[in-house]
Image (cartoon, rainbow, N blue to C red):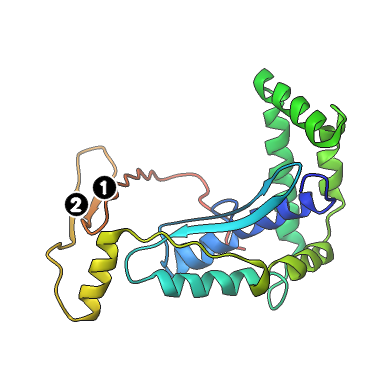
Amino acid sequence: NALDSRSTIFDVLGFILGGDSSSRLVRKIQNEKELDLNIECCQYTTPWNGAFFAAASSEPGKAEAMKAALFKELYAISGKRPPTKKEIERVLAQLSVNFIRSLRCLNSVSELIGKSLLYYGNPSYALKYIDELKKITPQKIIETASEFIKDDNCSIVELVPEETEKLILSRSNGIKSKSEKKMSMIKKNKLPRGIVYSDRTLPLIDIVFVFQGGTICETK
């Protein structure tokens, strides 16, 4: 919960695992293994209790492989692949910047003061957030992950659309789906090349525009 001194550790842990395009879950499961369409990991904090969660969505037939890869990465943070000093420094810098940016908006400042008073009984306590971040070490993250990220301390929720269940069943029985995947290319003068991928097996519309330039993620 918000009063627990490990609350900021969970913030850092969630960001290392699934906070942005450079995070472990995005690079390993989404980019390298191509098992999911969207993935994130973060902490939800309240004055009374909190939850640390990872959420992901996948194509039909990839759910089990994605789940196995997800748990492998979650357990690796306290085992085979503990957080590196560089990872922590990058996340601490990003969280600090996010916090400072939030102070530019009057509405955000008001919300921060209100939550600080509600959670801690002190309207200025939230300003200690960055100081708490600076105290975090790789060992503290490992200890916290070892204590909380384990089989007997998690709940798994799966939401599978009815049409997807029928599709998976038909594929397992060797029945061809009436829906066919189609890919087409759009190219116009002076515009980036566009690739359209159509899959009508899910009631989902996802449009992404990608432009050259900038840094997508840090690979090391």
Quarter that holds the C terminus? bottom right
Q: Which residue in the rendered view is the most extreme toward the front?
A: 48
**Which amino acid, by three-letter code, is at mark 2?**
Met
Please identify the quarter of the rendering in which residue 163 is found: bottom left
Whether 9 is drawn above or below 72: the answer is above
Which label sits on residue 185? 2
Callout 2 crowding tier (Cα within 10 Å): few <14, some 14–19, many ≥20: few
Residue 131, horizontal then vertical, whole percent: 87, 42
Between 58 and 153, the one lying in front of the other is: 153
Residue 143, horizontal then vertical, whole percent: 81, 68
Asked whether the viewer can see residue 150, the reply is no
Q: Kindly state the secondary structure of the residue where label 1 is placed.
A: loop
Q: Kindly state the secondary structure of the residue where label 2 is placed.
A: strand
Mark 2 vs mark 1: give the one in front.
2
- Give the residue displayed 77% in from the left and 68% down from the top: 147
Residue 121, horizontal then vertical, whole percent: 86, 31
Between 193 and 16, the one lying in front of the other is: 16
- Give the residue displayed 32% in from the left and 44% down from the top: 207
Separation (CA) of disc 2 from disc 1: 7 Å
Please report contact status of discs 2 and 1: CB closer than 8 Å, yes or no. Answer: yes
Whether 103 is drawn above or below 90: the answer is above
First-in-chain label (2 vs 1)? 2
Q: Which residue in the rendered view is the most extreme toward the top?
A: 106
- Give the residue displayed 58% in from the left and 75% down from the top: 72
**Which amino acid, by three-letter code, is at mark 1?**
Arg
In this rendering, position of residue 47 left or right of residue 217: right
Please identify the quarter of the rendering in which residue 167 is found: bottom left
Which label sits on residue 42? none
- Give the residue displayed 50% in from the left and 61% down from the top: 157
Residue 47, horizontal then vertical, whole percent: 76, 41
Q: What residue sits right under mark 1 in the picture?
A: 193
